[in-house]
Image: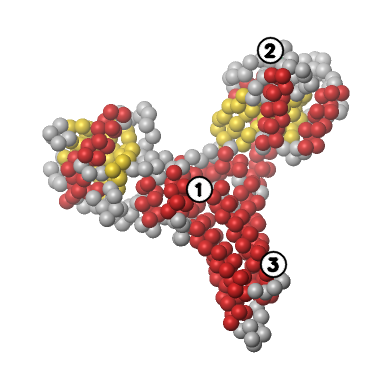
Amino acid sequence: MTDTIVAQCTPSGTGALALIRLSGSKALFFASKAAKLSSKKMLSDIPTHTINHGWIIDFHNNIIDEVLFFVMHGPKTFTGEDTIEISCHNNPFIIENIINQLITCGARLAQPGEFSRQAVENGKLDILQAEAIKELIHAQSQESLKLSLSQIHGSFSQHIQALEKPMIQAIALCEASFEFLEEEMDFSDQMSEILNSVQNEVARLTILFDQQKQIREGIRIALIGSVNAGKSSLFNALLGKQRAIVTNIAGTTRDVIESSFFQDGFYWTIIDTAGLRQTNDSIEQQGIERSYQEAQTADILLLVLDGSRITTNQEAIIYKDILEKYPQKCLIIQNKSDLKSTIQNNLFTPILSVSAQTGNGISGLKDLIKTKTALLFSDTSSSFLLNKRHFNLLQSFALELKEAQTLIHSSKEYELISLHLQKALSLLSELTGKSISDKAMDAIFRDFCVGK
Ligand SMILES: Nc1nc2c(ncn2[C@@H]2O[C@H](COP(=O)(O)OP(=O)(O)OP(=O)(O)O)[C@@H](O)[C@H]2O)c(=O)[nH]1
Ligand SMILES: [Mg+2]
């Protein structure tokens, strides 16, 4: 007997309709107490997987709302439990009244992620797939949407399961080596070879985690450069609105400002920063420190040069330093191309000349960012997304394999090697959720939204 839980699945806010889900062994029974159907039938007598018109009523037969009931008997439901979904009008008072009525009938309010947890506990999803649903809801780019969809269909689970087979093989060889110790049969070379290929695969997965940062969180594009170069003007031009303050006073921008939007399926966050220069003003100094921090974390750096004047020696030192530190992600952009006095910047060759003021070259700049983005993504060919939990478990897994390999090549203490391999195997089970502790389950579902 599972608890029967209820929650709104759609986000609160304006819109025509909302969806409330009721799931658990007594879902049909509780919903029947609050439902009146236009067909005059009882909800509990309705065939499964049908949509039925009716009303939600209170105990005095007063109508709370006119609704549609989606009747779905387990186990062919998302949670595996009997499920009633109620499509009602999207008004917070109506939704509250319906949920309260169902609670009065015996249901309990669902915790964040509890529907997905029911699905995992009923074997409808594994943990990796449940996590992918969360990723899907919060997808920040077309790419992450694609990957989370593929993950829901089990691509990552299959990948991890494929690692279990060689691990079991290695454990068998280890046990055999121990068993036939007297006969001097030794399978350590075979074992080491198998573990080696698993280690290579894990190394590939952990690199992937780093590369997928942009897919998960979108792309951060920082504007950096000297004071008055026109960073804030370019920031506004890229956003298409006057978001940052622009003046001819050097040092106008004091703090980091960022703004995000969708562009060609990706989530772009553009970051305006304080101009880099030596200053005694402590507020400006703090701002400049933040500019450097942004330069470090950004995925793409637009180094903005003021095309209307020669680069000073002090600026040249600063730019060189940035270019040396971040050669891969830096793009040199020369601004103020509209000014006749534009001086060829021989020291630093710009890749593009633009004018934030006239808008000339801005679409070219966007194209340039798109090309750079495509390059960032070219290495991330995989059909799944890794999160921090996966990454940490894979790190621990790799550590166990390393210990086992060291022992294979030194003391050959097979009992100890076997222990490391068993531990590694259990870490794989934890990844897919086959043998996950309640505490770890709680931690995973805590980040879900209520209603999922
Ligand atoms: N002619 C011309 N002037 C520009 C252009 N872009 C910016 N400016 C002017 O240059 C000055 C500085 O522009 P900002 O955008 O505030 O420069 P910034 O790099 O953000 O400066 P700080 O915030 O001080 O670091 C302003 O007077 C702008 O109007 C441009 O493309 N052409
Ligand atoms: Mg500025």
Query: Label 1 near label 3: C-beta < 8 Å?
Result: no
386 vs 270: above or below? below
Q: CA distance from mark 2 to mark 3?
A: 63 Å
The quarter of the displayed image where residue 421 is located: bottom right
The quarter of the displayed image where residue 240 is located: top right
Q: Position of residue 182 (x, y in %)?
A: 64, 86
Disc on res. 247: 2
The residue lying at 59 percent from left, 66 percent from top is 420
Query: Label 1 near label 2: C-beta < 8 Å?
Result: no
Q: Confirm whether residue 250 shows in the render.
A: yes
The residue lying at 63 percent from left, 21 percent from top is 236
Q: Position of residue 352 (x, y in %)?
A: 75, 29
With 100 as the anchor, is 323 left or right in this view?
right
Q: Earlier in the sequence, mark 3 or mark 1?
A: 1
The residue lying at 76 percent from left, 30 percent from top is 332
425 vs 287: above or below? below
Task: Give the secondary structure at mark 1.
Answer: helix
With 286 as the anchor, is 127 left or right in this view?
left
Q: Position of residue 12 (x, y in %)?
A: 37, 31
Q: CA distance from mark 2 to mark 1?
A: 44 Å
Task: Give the secondary structure at mark 2.
Answer: loop
Quadrant placement of the N terminus: bottom left
Mark 2 CB in 8 Å range of ligand 1?
yes
The residue lying at 25 percent from left, 48 percent from top is 27
With 429 as the anchor, is 66 left or right in this view?
left
Q: What residue sits right under mark 1 in the picture?
A: 148
Quadrant placement of the C terminus: top left
Q: Position of residue 143 (x, y in %)?
A: 56, 44
Q: Earlier in the sequence, mark 2 or mark 1?
A: 1
